Image: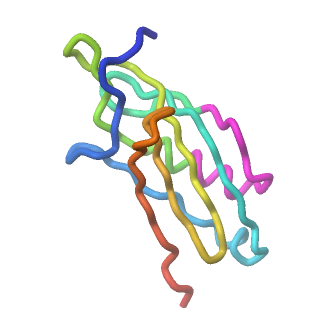
Amino acid sequence: MPPADSPPTGIDDSARITAPDYPISARKSSAEGIVVALAHIDWTGYVCRITMTVGTGFPAIDRASLDAMRTWRLKPAFAGGQPAEALYDVSMTFGITDYKLDVDRGPSDSRPKIGTRLPSDK
């Protein structure tokens, strides 16, 4: 895969990134952790492959993370003015008091962040 001129991004009107559900079984057992994955984004902006590089050790959380990523659509990367395939770094933090989805564009320090807090339990 040749390098892209611009990376894929979730910061766009056409992008659709949804945070995973925090599994009830994981919350009840106070399971927490960080999922780190590398998503292969095709030229249309859809996730076509995911490699989990770091799991939480809790299968329900890891599965919820991957399931959510499979539904994503991003603004694709561009190379030579044309949409191109690219890799996209993803980090998801699951914590009982703090729950967020960080979507990174690569090794840059100016990474866009999308934060989501858990709705209060009813």
Find residue 47 and report its horizontal and vertical position in percent: 44, 33
Q: Is residue 52 magenta?
A: yes
Measured along the vertical axis of the image, is residue 67 above or below residue 108? below
Identity of the residue drawn at 33% across and 48% down = 16
26 in relation to 6, above or below: below
Number of marks in the image?
A: 0
Q: Quadrant of the C terminus?
A: bottom right
Q: Residue furthest front?
A: 109
Residue at the far bottom: name it.
122
Q: Quadrant of residue 76?
A: top left
Left or right: 62, with 105 as reference point: right
Query: Is 66 displayed left or right of 10 in the figure?
Result: right
Question: Foreground residue, 79 or 121?
Answer: 79
Q: Could you tell me residue 50's position as x and y percent?
A: 57, 33
Q: Is residue 76 above or below residue 94?
A: above
At 58% across and 45% down in the image, what residue appears? 66
Colouring scheme, one of rainbow, by chain, secondary structure, one colour: rainbow
Residue 82 horizontal/vertical position (percent): 22, 15
Q: Residue at x 60, y 66 (%)?
A: 22
Residue at 49% x, 79% y is 119
Q: Does the magenta segment cover residue 65?
A: yes
121 on left or right of 106: right
User: What's drawn in magenta, residue-wise?
Assistant: 51-66
Residue 69 rendering spot, x and y as whole percentages: 50, 44
Placement of 2 over or under 9, stated as above or below: above
